[in-house]
């Protein structure tokens, strides 16, 4: 494998949430390559599971797909969040009005490592209690509660394909099978 190093990063565009750069790379043989890089804020999401093994997902419009998708509650981290669990707990309560008493980290992901730097921590939460639902301005979210096994089936039918949600569901299945949560 040729060694590669970044020789420059040039800001091309800045929006309210992301910055788009052009990375200029040089390989050990002198070849120069150009790659896009999108800087975004990190975030976290939470798969909520109730006492009947039903998952609570959010249904919301996503402009990238121009349609409504089913996802776990998730959002971007705030500067004051001491760790990703704070983000995940806040977003779960804001979007669903539910607060898990027990949580476990499934893992951290980068959805598109060849383009974005956004890291997303994925948690599962159980022993739910009522909190206060308070959506951000402009958010329109419906709650969907369905059996965990139905949600898994929806992955394989192509009905759930958001990366963080797929990983949350499959990760929770693995934790259950291993007796870890």
Image: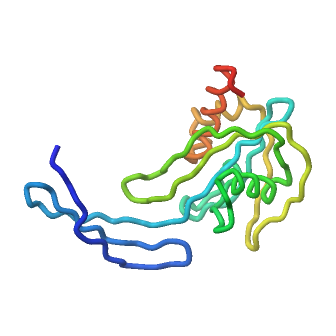
Left or right of residue 148: residue 10: left
- Identity of the residue furthest to the front in this view: 82
Residue 12 left/right relative to 138: left
Relative vertical location of residue 8 with respect to residue 42 in this rendering, above or below? below
Q: How many marks?
A: 0
Q: Residue furthest right?
A: 130
Q: Quadrant of the N terminus?
A: top left
**Residue that protrudes farthest toward the left in the picture:** 29
- Residue at 70 percent across and 46 percent down: it is 46
- In the rendered image, the vertical position of residue 141 relative to residue 47, given as above or below: below
Vertical placement of residue 46 versus 79, above or below: above
Residue 4: x and y in percent read 20, 55
Q: Is residue 6 left or right of residue 55?
A: left
- Colour treatment of the image: rainbow
Quadrant of the drawing holding the C terminus: top right
* Residue at x 58% of width, y 48% of height: 162
Residue 22: horizontal and vertical position, in percent? 31, 71
**Front one among 70 and 117:** 117
Q: Quadrant of residue 157?
A: top right
Task: Give x and y (percent) for residue 109.
Answer: 51, 46
């Amino acid at each position: 494998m040729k060694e590669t190093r970044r020789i420059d990063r040039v800001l091309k565009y800045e929006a309210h949430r992301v910055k788009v750069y052009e990375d200029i790379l040089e390989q050990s043989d002198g070849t120069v390559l150009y790659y896009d890089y999108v800087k975004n804020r990190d975030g976290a999401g939470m798969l909520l599971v109730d006492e009947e093994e039903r998952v609570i997902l959010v249904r919301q419009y996503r402009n990238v797909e121009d349609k409504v998708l089913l996802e776990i509650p998730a959002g971007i981290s705030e500067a004051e969040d001491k760790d990703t669990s704070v983000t995940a707990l806040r977003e779960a309560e804001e979007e669903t009005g539910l607060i898990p008493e027990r949580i476990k980290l499934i893992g951290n992901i980068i959805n598109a490592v060849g383009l974005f730097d956004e890291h997303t921590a994925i948690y599962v939460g159980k022993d739910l209690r009522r909190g206060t639902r308070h959506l951000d301005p402009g958010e329109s979210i419906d709650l969907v509660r369905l059996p965990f096994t139905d949600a898994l089936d929806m992955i394989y039918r192509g009905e759930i394909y958001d990366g963080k949600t797929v990983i949350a569901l499959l990760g929770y299945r693995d934790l259950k099978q291993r007796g870890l949560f």
